[in-house]
Amino acid sequence: MPTQTRGLTQMGMVVEIPEFLTATLGFAVYLLGAEINARVAPLRSFNIPEPVTGGLLASLVVLALYLGFGIELSFGLTARDFLLVLFFAGIGLNARLSDLIAGGKPLLLLLILTLLTIVAQNVIGAAGAVMFGYPAQAGVLFGSAALIGGHGTAIAWAPEVADATGLSGATELGVAVATLGLVLAALVGGPIARLLIEGRKLSPERPEEEHTVGLPNEVDPKSEIDHLTIMRVLLHLNLAIISGYILSEAITAAGLKLPLFVPCLIMGIVIANLRSALAPNAPPVSRTPSLALISEFALGAFLAMSLMSLQLWTIAELGLAIAVIMIAQTLFAVVFVIWALFPLMGSNYRAAVLAAGFGGFALGATPTAIANMTAVTKRYGPSPIAFIVLPLVSAFFVDIANAIVIQTIVNF
C-alpha cells in the first residue's frame, strides 16, 4: 500500500503512512529491538523492553528525516489502538477472583500513592511553570495531565488551560511533555526493578505461577501452544472485546466517559470468572502460555508503534523549561517509587515489580508500565497480582482522580 503526501509543514511535507504499512513497520521495529537487546547485554541487564529499544531507535530516524529533509511522517494508528484493546482484554481474562480479593489492600494503597503522585506532579509543574514565566495553571501540562494522564489527557485539557490563562500553544506544550514523559517512563522502570530485586536479593513469592504477559526468557519446551490453544484464546478475547463494546455504549449512554479498553478489561474479568465457575473442567484460557504470548505480542506491537510515531521535535522546540521540569519530575518519581511505594507495598518481589510498573505509569502510560513489568518478570519470575492491581488503578481510577485535581487547579 503506497504512502500518501498530505500537505506541507513549515519545513517541508507531511507524508501519511497508511494503517497496514504502519503495522508492518511496527512489527519490524519490535523485531529490531529484540535483535539489539539480544546483542547488547546492558539493555537486558537493566530490563529495557524490546519494543522500547526498537521504538526509540525508529523515532530517532523519524526525527532525522524531519530535521534533515523537512519530512514529517504521519502514521495511521487505528491498528495500534486495537492492539491496546486486545491487550487489556487479555489482562482481564487473566484475572482470577481470588487474586482480585487478594489484591484489595495493594489496590487501595496503590490508589492512595497515585493520588499523592498526581498532587506532587502538579506542585512541581506549577513551580516550574512560574519559574519559566508560564501561568501557574499551566503546571498541569507540566504535571499530571501530561505525565500520569498521557497524550490523550493532555490534549483534552489543553484548551481549558488556554481558556483560563490565555496561554498560546497549550496543546503543543502538553504533547511535548507527554512525549518526553513516555520516553523516560520506558527507560526508568527496568533499572529501578534491577536495583531493588538484585540489591535485596528478592525472588517471586510463588515462582510456580504462570506468566500473565509474555513467556519467561527460559521457555519450557513442554509449554502447550498449538493451533487449538491459540484459537481458544482468540475466541475469548473477541468475546471480551464484543461485550466490552456493548458495555462501553451503556456507560456512554449513562453520561460517563471511559476509554474503550476499560470496559473490555472489565468484561474479560467477568468472562474468565464466569467460565471458571460454570465450566471448571473446560480447557483453560486464563494464565495459559498462548494467552501470555498473544498479550505480549499485542503490547509489544502497540508500544513499538507508539514510540516510533513520537514527534520528538516538539520537545526541542520548548527548550530549557521542559528539560529542567522533566528532570525534576523524573527525580521525584524515582525517589518516590524507591523510598515510598516499595516499602509501603511490602518491600517484597511483588512490590519491586509494581515499582517498575509505577515508574513507567507515573511518567508515561499504562502500556509502558506493563511493558516494564513484563521485562522484569520475564527475567526474574512471575507476579500475577501486580498485573491485575496496577492496570485497575492506572486504567480506571486514575482518570477520575486526575480530572478532579486538574479541574480544581485550572479553575483556581
Image (tube, rainbow, N blue to C red):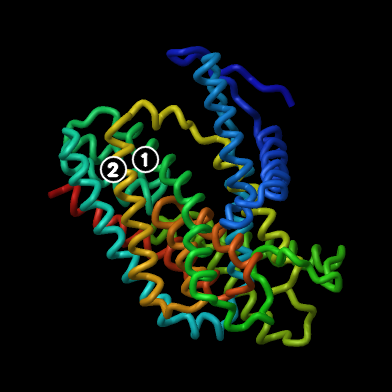
Q: Is residue 180 visible?
A: yes
* 1 or 2: tag closer to the N-terminus: 1
Q: Residue at x 39, y 66 (%)?
A: 338
- Answer above or below: position of 382 versus 22: below
Q: Residue at x 40, y 55 (%)?
A: 257
Q: Which residue corresponds to mark 1?
A: 177
Numbered marks: total: 2
- Answer above or below: position of 281 versus 215: below
- Residue nearest the viewer, comparing 304 with 249: 304
Q: Which residue corresponds to mark 2?
A: 325
What x and y, as percent, mark residue 17?
A: 63, 28
- Residue nearest the viewer, comparing 278 with 192: 192
Q: Is residue 255 visible?
A: no
Q: Are marks 1 and 2 in contact (CB under 8 Å)?
A: yes
Crowdedness of circle 2 by 10 Å Cα count: few (<14), some, many (20+)? many
Please name the amino acid that badge 1 sits on. Answer: Val
Q: Residue 273's image quarter?
A: bottom right
Left or right placement of residue 196 versus residue 338 in this view = right
- Answer above or below: position of 95 versus 231: below
- Residue nearest the viewer, comparing 399 with 103: 103
Please name the amino acid that badge 2 sits on. Answer: Ile
Q: Residue at x 33, y 68 (%)?
A: 113
Mark 1 → mark 2, Cα distance in angstroms: 9 Å
Q: Secondary structure at mark 2?
A: helix
The furthest residue to the left: 412
Quadrant of the rendering where the N terminus is positioned: top right
